[in-house]
Image (tube, helix red, strand yellow):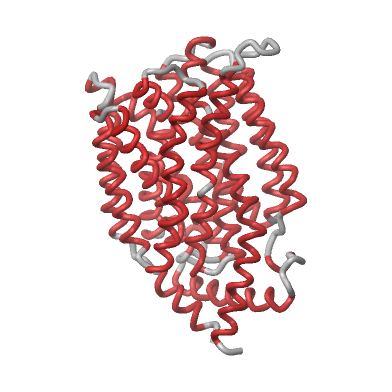
């Protein structure tokens, strides 16, 4: 086969897989992110009706990431063994039920318990999808595909904000508080989507009857060549992978990305309410969606630009630097400038993540990829650190802005760490193209 004809066939296969898999995976991520972050909309309601203090809220919001971070590793190994269809269905139904159970909390302890349970059940989803995409998509397009998958985050907040705000206003409907309706409805959505996943997802391209046989064969050749390339340079065993300096570097970067992200996510509704001087509800939900609309546009453009230019490291570093500067500006900005600064920060923190994942997925192979991705996602502990670090800094400096300034400084620091990454993407893309000839 000539190179151009192979290239055209690959493009057709990628387009076919993109149409089939990405929208459904994106839907799953929308539900996932909504179920972990909707507690931000319930903050004031939980304080008023259950007596949850600001410190207890910060702890509960962050506890999700304790169990989430440490359960991802075994979950990814299970997915590698039993396949995505069965395992994704199992964990999604489980986390939907755990999210629904939040409607029954009575105080601090029950809220802590259900957040730990939610983290445990949801832990396997994100690292599982990152691994799953390596089974299907060649390295040269993976940044774009991961970017499309990550679009689920801004979509969750664009539509989830107004939905959560609307449900919060169903106070005393059928004898339930609005926050109880929110957790129940959004949790049961996860259960329904999880059941649908069993009938929709295929484990690997070899199981996909909707891909023509000749395209499956050509795709398998390319993916196998890329796997061999990664095998030659990545750690061969799980223990070596855990000690690998590049994996630890990736872990540090991802941890700081999550600190930046959840420093925004868990407090964005509260900060918006303060900016526009309105209580949490549909109006705050709508205004809170504005930064996520901008983030959606950034998500659609920046990862694709990084793939096209092969400048993943430089683009990611500059994005984090811009996000850090915007975070520094936010506390002293007025309503309009504040929303603008939030939009820049949110766009940077979300759009950088699919670009980041091209680094470890271009380096790790075989079971080390399954374990390595899960190890890196231990960086989700940043979601625990962020709200609690903000509370501690605010208390120590007796300022409501101290925590935001600290998180902004960590974001700028992370831009420096990203600039030090060895970007092997160019080599992987060249090897992939060479194997077509």
Please identify the quarter of the rendering in which residue 363 is found.
bottom left
Left or right of 120? Residue 281 is: left
Q: Position of residue 425 (x, y in %)?
A: 42, 69
Number of disc labels = 0
Residue 110 at least partly seen: no
Residue 153 visible to the viewer: yes
Who is closer to the viewer here, 334 or 29? 334
Up-down: is 380 above or below 317?
above
From the viewer's side, name the closer residue of 166 and 365.
Answer: 166
**Residue 109 spot, x, y in % from top left:** 54, 18
Seen in the picture, residue 305 relative to 217 is either above or below; the reply is above
Q: Is residue 250 above or below residue 308?
A: above
Query: Residue placed at 46% from the left, 74% from the top?
Result: 429
The N terminus, quarter of image: bottom right
Apparent side of residue 179 relative to residue 90 in the rendered image (left or right)? left
Query: In x, y percent, where is residue 175?
Result: 68, 10
Q: Quadrant location of the C terminus?
A: bottom right
The residue at 66%/37% (across/down) is 190
Q: Residue at x 66, y 25 (%)?
A: 184
Q: Residue furthest bottom?
A: 2
**x, y percentage for residue 18?**
61, 61
In the image, is residue 352 above or below residue 400? below
Q: Nearer the viewer, residue 413 or 180?
A: 180
Q: Nearer the viewer, residue 326 or 362?
A: 326
Is 250 left or right of 203, judged from the image as shown? left
């Amino acid at each position: 086969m000539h190179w151009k004809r192979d290239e055209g066939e690959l493009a057709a296969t990628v387009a076919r897989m993109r149409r089939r898999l990405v929208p459904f995976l994106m839907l799953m991520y929308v539900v996932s992110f909504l179920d972990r972050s909707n507690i931000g909309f319930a903050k004031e309601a939980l304080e008023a009706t259950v007596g949850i203090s600001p410190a207890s809220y910060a702890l509960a919001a962050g506890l999700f990431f304790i169990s989430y971070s440490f359960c991802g590793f075994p979950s990814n190994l299970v997915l590698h063994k039993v396949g995505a269809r069965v395992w994704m269905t199992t964990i999604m139904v489980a986390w939907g039920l755990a999210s629904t159970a939040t409607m029954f909390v009575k105080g601090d302890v029950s809220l802590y318990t259900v957040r730990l349970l939610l983290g445990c059940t949801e832990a396997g989803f994100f690292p599982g999808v990152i691994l799953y995409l390596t089974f299907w998509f060649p390295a040269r397009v993976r940044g774009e595909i991961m970017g499309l998958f990550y679009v689920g985050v801004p979509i969750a907040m664009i539509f989830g904000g107004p939905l959560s705000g609307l449900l919060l206003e169903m106070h005393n409907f059928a004898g339930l508080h609005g926050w109880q309706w929110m957790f129940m409805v959004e949790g049961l959505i996860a259960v329904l989507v999880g059941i649908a996943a069993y009938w929709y997802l295929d484990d690997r391209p070899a199981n996909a009857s909707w891909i023509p046989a000749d395209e499956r064969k050509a795709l398998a050749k390319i993916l196998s060549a890329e796997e061999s390339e990664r095998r030659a340079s990545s750690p061969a065993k799980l223990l070596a992978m855990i000690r690998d300096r590049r994996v630890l570097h990736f872990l540090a970067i991802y941890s700081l990305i999550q600190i930046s992200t959840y420093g925004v996510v868990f407090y964005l509704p509260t900060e918006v309410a303060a900016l526009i001087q309105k209580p949490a509800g549909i109006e705050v939900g709508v205004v809170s969606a504005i930064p996520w609309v901008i983030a959606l546009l950034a998500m659609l453009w920046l990862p694709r630009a990084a793939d096209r230019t092969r400048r993943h490291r430089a683009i990611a570093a500059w994005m984090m630097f811009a996000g850090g500067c915007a975070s520094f500006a936010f506390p002293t900005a007025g309503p309009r400038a504040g929303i603008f600064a939030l939009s820049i920060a949110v766009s940077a923190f979300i759009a950088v993540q699919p670009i980041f994942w091209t680094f470890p997925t271009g380096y790790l192979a075989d079971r080390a990829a399954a374990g390595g991705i899960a190890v890196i996602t231990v960086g989700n502990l940043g979601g625990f650190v962020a709200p609690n670090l903000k509370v501690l800094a605010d208390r120590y400096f007796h300022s409501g802005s101290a925590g935001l300034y600290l998180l902004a400084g960590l974001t700028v620091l992370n831009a420096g760490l990203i600039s030090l990454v060895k970007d092997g993407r160019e080599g992987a893309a060249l090897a992939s193209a060479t194997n077509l000839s």
